[in-house]
Image: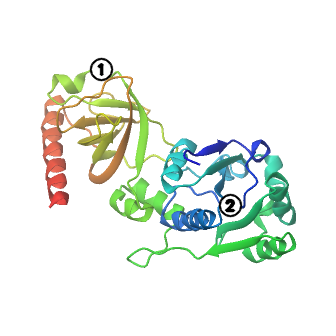
Amino acid sequence: MISLLQFSNLGEVQLPAKPLHLAVGMFDGMHRGHQSVIALAVEAARRDCGISAVLTFWPHPSALFRPEDPTRLIMTPEAKAKVLKRSGVDVLITQSFTLEFAAIKAENFLPELKRHLPHLAVIYVGKNWRFGRGRIGDVSLLVQIAASLGLTVISLPRVRNEEDETISSTKIRSLIVEGEIAQANQMLGYPYFGEGEIIPGKGLGRTIGFPTLNLNWKPELMPRFGVYAVKIFGGEQIGSLSAVANYGVRPTVEDTLEPRLEVHVLADCSFNAGDLVTVEFLQFLRPEQKFKDVAALQAQIEIDRDSAMRWFGSVRQ
């Protein structure tokens, strides 16, 4: 398969009669640990002349069981699909995590998968993955039930980074919120990114010599308010451009309740309102702050631009 085939729930899935290698998990962030699990499924499916697939869920289970304080997810389903497509997966199944689905008993989970996916051959999960009502199912139970159904289970231990820290979505969420974006990117295995359409702004940046692109981007998990060195991507015709971005509520000029991502490109910019772009967060430069007036803000933006340019110059060496 050339493109990523997507289904919104298990009941919709229709696939050719080929061995199915299925990675299962929430996979929020698609970090290096997730990638190792999924890579095994992709490689094995190719050797087996089969199909590689990922079964993931939306929303996070906490949205049902802890609605007053749900887990804020690193990525949208669309962003997850984008990263998965790069990994070479053939099929993505994004199962709605409803009360009905959550009520499936652990011992019935695999038979339910097999009913919807009759050519299921191998399941790939992380060592600590839990499943079934009350999350009572673990890998040992998964292996036991799989054997009775003629299925194979492959589980992988958690991946550790170069500092011997366990890579996890929870840790990455904390790093993003704290502004430790370089560390988050190291655990993700790619730059944390946001996607959105460029929308018209008030034009203040242009009047002070720093025109900005305003993105319609509303992440569940908000990164730390502040200034970042970023790359902005559009269509293939434009490619990537180095830029400096501010994410926050613009306290000096507006102090809005809703955070906004504004990007100032460090070279000639070919993007326009209506363009869909991707912004990769590469380095946190400073926290957002309120200045006494627009002149003080302008002076700081000059410093931020120079800081970003020095950072990009240093990473090219």
Q: Position of residue 70 (x, y in %)?
A: 62, 50
* Amino acid type at image mark 2: Leu
Residue at the spot x=18%, y=31% of the render?
210
- As helix, strand or loop, the secondary structure at mark 2 comes to strand
Which residue is at the far front?
A: 49
Q: Earlier in the sequence, mark 1 or mark 2?
A: 2
> Is there any visible trace of residue 138 in the rendered image?
no
- The vertical placement of 276 against 18, above or below, is above
Give the amino acid type for the residue marked by disc 1 in the picture. Answer: Lys
Q: Residues within 10 Å of mark 2 (few under 14, many from 20)?
A: many
Name above or below for residue 117 compared with residue 145: above
Q: Nearer the viewer, residue 173 or 235?
A: 235
Horizontal side of 115 relative to 258 (left or right) equals right
Helix, strand or loop status at disc 1: loop
User: From what the image shows, is residue 245 above or below residue 130?
Assistant: above
* In this view, 302 is above or below 70: above
Q: Residue at x 35, y 22 (%)?
A: 273
Q: Is residue 98 visible?
A: yes
Residue 231: percent from left, percent from top: 29, 45
Q: Which residue is mark 1?
A: 202
Q: Residue 263 at x, y = what percent?
A: 28, 36
Residue, x 55% and y 49% (percent of image)?
72
Spatial CA distance of label 1 from label 2 is 48 Å
Quadrant hosting residue 242: top left
Instruction: Kindly identify which residue carries mark 2.
Output: 22
